[in-house]
Image (cartoon, rainbow, N blue to C red):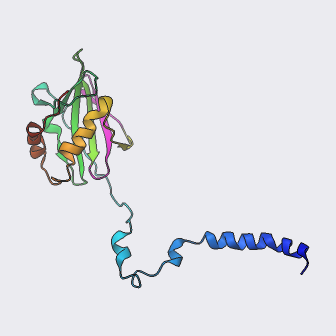
Amino acid sequence: MKSGQSLNLLPGWVFCLAILCSLPVQALEPDEEEAGGWQQNYIEKPDNWQELDASLPPYPEEKNLLNLKIGTDGMQFAVNLDKPSLVRGEDGVVRYTVVLIPPSGVWNVSNEGLRCGEKVYRRYAYGMDGRWQPMENSPWREVRGSGANRYRGILYHDYFCNPMKPDQTPQEMIDSFSENWHEM
């Protein structure tokens, strides 16, 4: 074979090598039975979770607010939970209404949900003039615990989605606030 002919074969070999490298890794792994069944326990299963429909709660009243004494990283907001709005849905979402009140006294009202285990939240509605303004198809977002949003991280980790108390009732969640206060 002449040296010119071997150079002409090089693109064909590169193509075959690329095909072999692109084969799924699963094809090269042993069957679950051959591996002793260990893969069944550790392979991630697809998420078949489905959020259930939930109606908005009644608009919050001042008499039902619980001041959470959660700081907002230097921002001057009092963080309040509307106690009657707190529910744990059959879908695992903890739904609640929060009322942030700055020194001006204007209520910033939001009905939200935390998806325990996923560390995400979603806003269902904003409150304005004593009425709900629904947010249709709002996205799930990552819980971040800084600034004015610090309260979500604390609610998630310490109260609503505590892995040490996964089956708390809403009343048990409310009672836990007196056990573990966060200073401003």
Question: Which residue is drawn at the image coordinates 59% and 72% (left, top)?
Answer: 23
Confirm whether the magenta stretch covers residue 125: yes
Task: Report the quarter where the C terminus lies.
Answer: top left
Question: Which residue is drawn at the image coordinates 21% and 54% (left, top)?
Answer: 90
Q: Report whether 82 appears left or right of 10.
A: left
Where 35 falls versus 118 (above or below)?
below
Question: Which residue is drawn at the image coordinates 20% and 31% (left, top)?
Answer: 70
Magenta stretch: dominant SS? strand
Q: What is the x, y in percent for residue 134?
A: 32, 35
Residue 43, image quadrant: bottom left
Q: Is residue 139 visible?
A: yes
Q: What is the x, y in percent for residue 49?
A: 33, 58
Confirm whether the magenta stretch covers residue 174: no
Name the residue nearer the viewer: 177 or 92. 177
Q: Is residue 133 visible?
A: no
Name the residue nearer the viewer: 179 or 121. 179
Q: Report whether 40 appears left or right of 26.
A: left
Q: What is the x, y in percent for residue 82?
A: 16, 33
Name the residue nearer the viewer: 6 or 155. 6
Where 114 falls versus 126 (above or below)?
below
Q: Residue furthest top?
A: 104
Residues in magenta, as a range: 116-135
Question: Which residue is drawn at the image coordinates 12% and 31% (left, top)?
Answer: 66
Q: Report whether 181 appears left or right of 12.
A: left
Residue 39, image quadrant: bottom left
Where 19 falls versus 104 (above or below)?
below
